[in-house]
Amino acid sequence: MNTELFIANRLFFDKTNQHFLSKRIIRIALFGIALGLAVMIISVAVITGFKSEIRNKVIGFGSHIKITNYESRNSFEVPPISNKQPFLDNLKNMNGIEAVHEFATKPGMIKTEESIQGIVFKGVAATYDWTFFKKNLIEGELPQLNNEKRVNEILLSENVSKLLKLNIGESAVLYFVNENEITPRMLQLKVCGIYRTSLEEFDNLFVIGDIKQIQRLNDWEVDQISGFEVLITNFDEIKTIERQVRYMVISYSEDNSSILRTESITRQYPQIFDWLAILDMNVVVILVLMIMVAGFNMISALLVLILERSTMIGVLKALGSPNWSIRKVFLYLSVFLTSRGMLWGNVIGIVLLLIQKLFHVIQLNPESYYVDVVPVNINILHILLLNIGSIIVTTLMLLIPSYLVSKISPDKSIRFD
């Protein structure tokens, strides 16, 4: 039988002993622990949710990994490559690869009677996965692409449609300039849908349509494209998978064929992902501060418990209990109290997150934060790790103040009236 745990259990659960506890001090400590854990849960959920939201938007425009002509030099005017690459079948069957799509891009402009806007026309094939744009579609419908003929439909962003005063069903005139040509080439395409991602750097730039339109503009063959977009199942493995894809592309390269390059989205837009990485430091600072606050609150409560139970400590020592055994009693009691505070912290934090996730109570300015509402990512693993880490760190912090037990002398602490 664990004697120390039995005593701590009686002290914590036996109502006849509640008058020995300084209820106000204990409640303040429990409130501090609950508040600290709730803040940690909310902070981690909001930061990870924000990072995931921005990351998914960037990936939605450019995929995880791109395979293009080595001479592209990060330009949207990309030299063509063949869509009949020898590595494609193995690439599509590689572990961690979700999908591979053909794409083509060409910079140009949209001109109306009143305004003009520079854009990048991104062409995709009929097999393109429209999940991202379907999620962000606010009006109209997606282009109905097929493999037989060119489709004269495009998807515009809300920003561009407002700037140029183009509505669903209206025709937009797009101009493109080819190298060594004086006269620009023109396309007249119908606006079939309007999307909004609130990521202005991309919303103001991309127009989505049929890849066959770009092949026609560039006088390409039907098998010529700008490159391949590779989607992976786990973003955390992007560096490893990119190396595997690069090795595969190099291994299958043939003589006299175009030299291909692979580039991950993190290397294509380093400024965005470096900024997102900085947010991790903010989370670490918040977690450290909140755990320190919870620890010091429990230290105060433990000292009060020890001083109030000085007579009991003296009796236990007189009966032959060693100091470490008595210290364990108060450590167990502190863990019980900490667990109660953490229970309320979990309830408060999770309830507030669910309210925000379901009802979008707190909204943001998309021009400043790139999202309309505060995004939250409720991850059970994160919550469990926060709870386990908090209880371990708080208990370790209580080891030093529990040493006060050894300073209490039985002959001075035991009093008879």
Image (cartoon, rainbow, N blue to C red):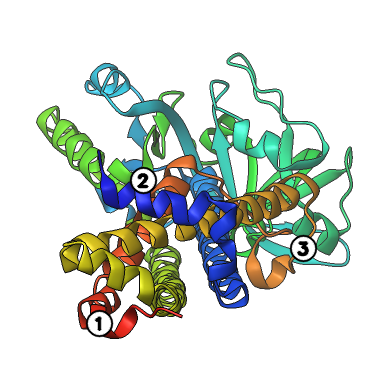
Which residue is most to the top? 148
Q: Nearer the viewer, mark 3 or mark 1?
A: 1
Dot placed on the residue nearer the N-terminal end, 3 or 1: 3
- Residue at 61% x, 31% y is 131
Could you tell me the amino acid type at mark 3? Gln
Question: Alpha-carbon distance for marks 3 and 2?
Answer: 43 Å
Would residue 352 be found to the left or right of residue 289 on screen?
A: right
Q: Is residue 147 above or below residue 26?
A: above
Residue kind at label 1, given as amino acid type? Asp
- Which residue is farthest front? 417
Residue 225 image offset from top left, x and y in percent: 42, 34
Residue sitting nearer the eye, 51 or 297: 297
Task: Kindly check if marks 1 and 2 are in contact, taking CB atoms under 8 A apart as contact.
Answer: no
Of the numbered discs 1 and 2, the one sitting upstream in the chain is 2
Dividing the picture into quadrants, the one containing residue 46 is bottom right
Viewer-side residue, 378 vs 97? 378
- Crowd band around label 3 with a 10 angstrom C-alpha radius: few (<14), some (14–19), many (20+): few
Q: Secondary structure at mark 3?
A: loop
- The structure residue drawn at horizontal position 36% and vertical position 52%, both measured from the top left corner, is 7
Looking at the rendered structure, which numbered label has been put on residue 20? none
Mark 1 or 2, closer to the camera: 1
Residue on which the image places disc 1: 411
In the foreground, 158 or 379: 379
As drawn, 30 above or below 197: below
For residue 383, side relative to residue 242 (left or right): right
Q: Is residue 301 visible?
A: yes
* Apparent side of residue 50 relative to residue 257 in the rendered image (left or right): right
Which residue position holds label 3?
A: 363
Give percent across and percent down for residue 106.
53, 49
- Residue at the spot of label 2: 79
Q: Nearer the viewer, residue 384 or 357?
A: 384
